[in-house]
Image (cartoon, helix red, strand yellow):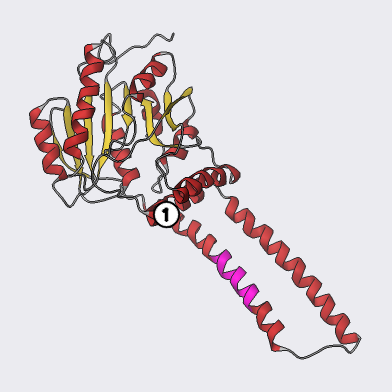
């Protein structure tokens, strides 16, 4: 058992960080679940009554922010911040974590839709009390996923591992992070965020809590296939340069094949067996052109990321706050 010095004196101050984007259908339902969990932990003496539920409005176009403001007026455990515009899930989580890092002992990020089992928080806090600085929520199974989503998601983690990126298999953004880690994490200035790959880079002692993911309580998912693919590609290019190494390998392979083809052409010419044909010529040109365009595209992706990073634009801008901070 590790001895801890808590901001709340003898008890741990916990902040639930909940990113919200157009969640007016589900927020009235899940907010009660989050509050019940906090109050139960307070009643059982597990956490301080200064713990909070921090909603991060990510530029919602519906009544999400109005609901958050009403919740903050109804109970002091609810607080909220609103971004000036939609900046994406990862930046919304980051905004909440950075807002909470000086006010809490631990921050737990969890999605608003109620799919992540909130009861896993109890075990996360136990792991933290035992000495872990980061506790990853990991899905024990993917029973609620379609075959396509399950296959692509599991394949994504395997590809990341193969690319040399350090991630926790089947972990998304349900995690506990201590204020100590958050203060070190604040030194990471990446604009292209992939949080599930960045936190392992911070280091410190970590642990895993397994849980089952449920069906969404209400509303529709705001993470369609194109966004998931975008997140996957961003994760690969943000954490690994192996795609560039693969281009080098592909270039060497194509060069070797081309060299063999040149020798073959010379031999055929000397033997007088050359046959004029446009099919073979156009096929070779098309193949080489495709390889070159693919390589330029991958390199361009990395150059584009460098371009965004050197601008040093803010990753989030908070326009409003609600509740007792």
Main SS class of the magenta portion in the image: helix
Q: Which residue is found at the position 54% from the left and 45% from the top?
A: 160
Secondary element type, mark 1? helix
Give the image quarter of residue 78: top left
What x and y, as percent, mark residue 103?
A: 25, 24
Residue at 31% of width from left, 20% of height from top? 105
Q: Write down the residue under mark 1.
A: 230
Above/below status of 298 relative to 213: below
Q: Is residue 320 left or right of residue 305?
A: left
Q: Residue at x 38, y 16 (%)?
A: 126
In this view, the residue farthest toward the right is: 271
Magenta-colored stretch includes residue 289? yes
Q: Vertically, is 219 above or below 282?
A: above
Circle 1 Cα neighbour tier, 10 Å, few/some/many (<14 / 14–19 / ≥20): few
For residue 323, say whether it is visible. Answer: yes
- Res 178 → quadrant: top left
Q: What stretch is highlighted in magenta?
A: 286-296
Residue 176 within the segment the image draws in magenta: no
Q: In which quarter of the image is the C terminus?
A: top left
């Amino acid at each position: 058992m590790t001895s801890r010095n808590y901001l709340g004196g003898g008890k741990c101050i916990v902040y639930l960080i909940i990113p919200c984007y157009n969640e007016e259908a589900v927020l009235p339902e899940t907010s009660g679940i989050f509050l019940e969990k906090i109050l139960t932990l307070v009643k059982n003496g597990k956490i301080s009554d200064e713990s909070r539920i921090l909603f991060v409005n990510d530029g919602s176009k519906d009544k999400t922010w109005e609901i958050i403001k009403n919740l903050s007026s109804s109970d002091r455990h609810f607080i909220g911040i609103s971004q000036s515009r939609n900046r994406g899930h990862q930046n919304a989580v980051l905004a909440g974590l950075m807002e909470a890092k000086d006010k809490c002992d631990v921050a737990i990020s969890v999605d608003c839709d109620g799919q992540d089992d909130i009861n896993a928080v109890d075990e996360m806090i136990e792991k933290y009390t035992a000495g872990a600085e980061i506790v990853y929520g990991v899905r024990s199974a993917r029973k609620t996923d379609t075959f396509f989503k399950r296959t692509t998601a599991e394949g994504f983690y395997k590809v990341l591992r193969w690319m040399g990126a350090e991630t926790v298999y089947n972990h998304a953004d349900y995690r506990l992070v201590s204020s100590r880690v958050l203060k070190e994490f604040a030194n990471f200035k990446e604009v292209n965020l992939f949080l599930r790959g960045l936190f392992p880079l911070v280091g410190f002692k970590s642990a895993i809590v397994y849980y089952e993911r449920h069906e969404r309580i209400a509303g529709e998912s705001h993470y369609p296939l194109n966004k998931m693919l975008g997140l996957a590609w961003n994760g690969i290019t943000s954490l690994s340069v192996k795609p560039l190494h693969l281009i080098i390998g592909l270039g060497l392979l194509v060069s070797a094949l081309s060299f063999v083809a040149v020798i073959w052409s010379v031999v055929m010419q000397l033997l007088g067996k050359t046959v004029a044909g446009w099919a073979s010529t156009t096929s070779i040109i098309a193949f080489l052109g495709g390889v070159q365009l693919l390589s330029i595209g991958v390199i361009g992706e990395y150059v584009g990321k460098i371009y965004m990073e050197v601008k040093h634009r803010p990753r989030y801008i908070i326009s409003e706050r609600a509740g007792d901070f």
